[in-house]
Image (spheres, coloured by chain):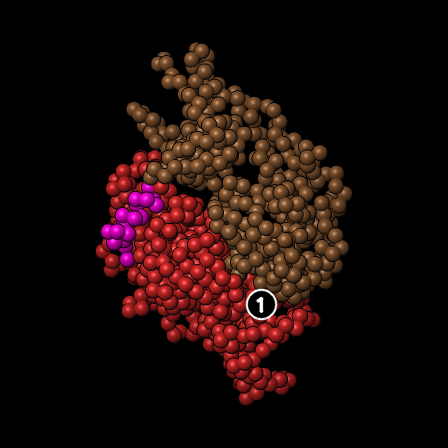
Chain colours: A brown, B red
Amino acid sequence: MAKARRTKPRIQASAQFFEEDNQPVVLSPQDERALAQIYRLAQQISTAVESQNDPTLAIPTRSLGNVSFNESKRILEMGSKTTSRELFNLSQAKSFMQTTLVASGAKRLIEMGKTTSIRGLYYMLKHDIKPTKEPTFHNQGECDPIIEDCEVLLAALREELHLFAEKRGDMVGNIQIVDSGDEIDCSRMGSGGYAIPSIVEPSVVQFKKCDADFVLHVEKNTVWQRFNEDKFWKKHNCILTHGNGQPPRGVRRLLNRLNTELGLPIFCLLDNDPWGYYIYSVVKQGSINLAYESERMATPEAKFIGLRSRDFERCGLSEGVKITLNDLDRKRAKQIAEYPWFIHKKDWQREIDVMLRNGFKLEVEALVSRSISYMTEEYVPRLLKEGDFLD
Amino acid sequence: MAKARRTKPRIQASAQFFEEDNQPVVLSPQDERALAQIYRLAQQISTAVESQNDPTLAIPTRSLGNVSFNESKRILEMGSKTTSRELFNLSQAKSFMQTTLVASGAKRLIEMGKTTSIRGLYYMLKHDIKPTKEPTFHNQGECDPIIEDCEVLLAALREELHLFAEKRGDMVGNIQIVDSGDEIDCSRMGSGGYAIPSIVEPSVVQFKKCDADFVLHVEKNTVWQRFNEDKFWKKHNCILTHGNGQPPRGVRRLLNRLNTELGLPIFCLLDNDPWGYYIYSVVKQGSINLAYESERMATPEAKFIGLRSRDFERCGLSEGVKITLNDLDRKRAKQIAEYPWFIHKKDWQREIDVMLRNGFKLEVEALVSRSISYMTEEYVPRLLKEGDFLD
């Protein structure tokens, strides 16, 4: 085996790299931290080779068995179990190669000061391993879990590795931000709004001035449009966001930052159905698959402001708005009721139980059957005033 | 039969209605035109009743048989065929009722100065017809085609009836707009961008100042992020939009307005696959289902700037980026080649033929395999310089 070339750490506080067109790239402290982690990994492999040991990676295990609910922090957390991935093991050599390849891709992106989508990274790294015709990745499905491995291995969010997810979700309200050097006043964003980027780390998005008292996060963009048109955020001095269904990473991270950095309460207006409960669970406690990122992606302080199982009667809705529960709904509702962060909460157990006994679910739009602006002028204001929400 | 109450037209140039909270509603000229159309419809039914005739609606037929390609305007157009919908016809009475119900819903929305989603309208209109338990609509699937009927019947886009679609798609670039009274400088929108609203009619969105020379419309938001991060729109003095796949109505209407009102060329960067071709077809010629709106939704001047079937070789892409065509791809490609607006274009016939002979398709992201910014720094600039695009 040829002697491996020594990889010298070359990270310094003021390190500057060069983009393809020779513009110097200024690294953020986050960039420097991520690069240092990548070099640490490379050093570790290189050291193993030089001391004639088998190169091995200890990848933190990302399965349910290694995830637990931290009662005091109120978020999902990863445990300390790791899985060993060895270069000199026939069944692991390929994924070892893929892991270092993804890490080297992240290094290139950071040094260039560029970001790409996970699909872009896949295309960037895919090639045949000469002289064989064996591709580095057969498809993106092979690459995505390796990206997650690298996130836990390097203790970095994928955004810090310069990878972005699809973006969807918009914001308006009484806040001024700076995004990539541009000052954006979210109270002057018309009917369209500010499109929340995929990467909202402090290196990209800074909060400049915020007068808002809270954040109202709604599930759907159509509902968001109703709230924006009625200038709800102006009347109630708040910020209005949506995530077009299950909020993408950028939106969840932004909610987390609005809560932890600005101290704003986050109220979630979601459907009265298992999917709405699940969205709430992900916003509040984090995702089971990606428990390692909960610390910065989840917002344990978030509150659920509706819709509620009691609302059909309480709001005097018309019969036509009921949507009968199907078997999958019932199954999912029971699973969610068993989640460790719901199982000890009487309010949530009652909520889910009433929905199951009702036999129907309700969408937020069902409130339109009362009147077009019932949700913005009566429903949410009343619950806010009465402090009537689920935790 | 009881004598119908006479519906007096009460539309005047300066008509003011009142919102639920008693704020006067100022009607736009578009609102007044749409209301006049609704009153005309009501008057027509009322006149029939008073003269003891059976109330009948003549609904323009929305099937392929009543759609043709207008060679000189280069858009899809509806023909003049209509279908009669009668109140005193057992099989048509319900849809007659639903049609007038949707029209009355639009009237309420316009008079209140509010908009809603098509799902919102469904909830707004759904109720049991007393004393029966028969609902006005069983589900949204019954309501949506009636909305389209009303659009053609009233010669109004659904946006003019105050109905909005889901919104997705963002914009940045050298243009300043006014959206609902807010001035928005799209050259100062950071990494997130201005979220394009569903309703971009001149009553909502006005163009204030535009220095841009053209519009680059890309298919995916991840590609848009690459172009925005590389400040492509600044270097090439343009506007950058995406529609997250098949662009929604708001984005198509905006492209149409940017082209027809500001005279900007529209270049579409889409995948080299049947879906990319289809998106181009919808942007350029309009949608077959909704041919009646092509005049304001389609942009016959749009150009296709890639990806092209020749690009695998021409751009020296690596083997791994090929995606093998499946049977559905082949079938769709052949159908699209037969569209009247493609069938006489040699360039398009060759393009589709080469893709079929290649046996593979290519995504825009495949260009990343050359280098991360190859698409923004080499591919698109070269085609723009050489004027090398498909019409």
Span highlighted in magenta in the image: B374-391
Q: What element carries label 1?
A: loop
Secondary structure that dominates the magenta span:
helix
Location of the N terminus of chain B (image quadrant): bottom right
Q: For residue A223, say whether it is visible.
A: yes
In the rendered image of this protein, does residue B216 appear above or below residue A51?
A: below
A31 to the left or right of A242? left
Q: For residue A146, say whether it is visible.
A: no
Q: Is residue B375 magenta?
A: yes
> Which chain is indicated by disc 1?
B
Q: In the depicted view, which residue is nearer to us: B118 or A226?
A: A226
Location of the C terminus of chain B (image quadrant): bottom left
Q: Does the magenta stretch include residue A355?
A: no
The amino acid type found where label 1 is placed reads Lys
| Residue that label 1 marks | B114
Q: Position of residue A224 (x, y in %)?
A: 58, 57
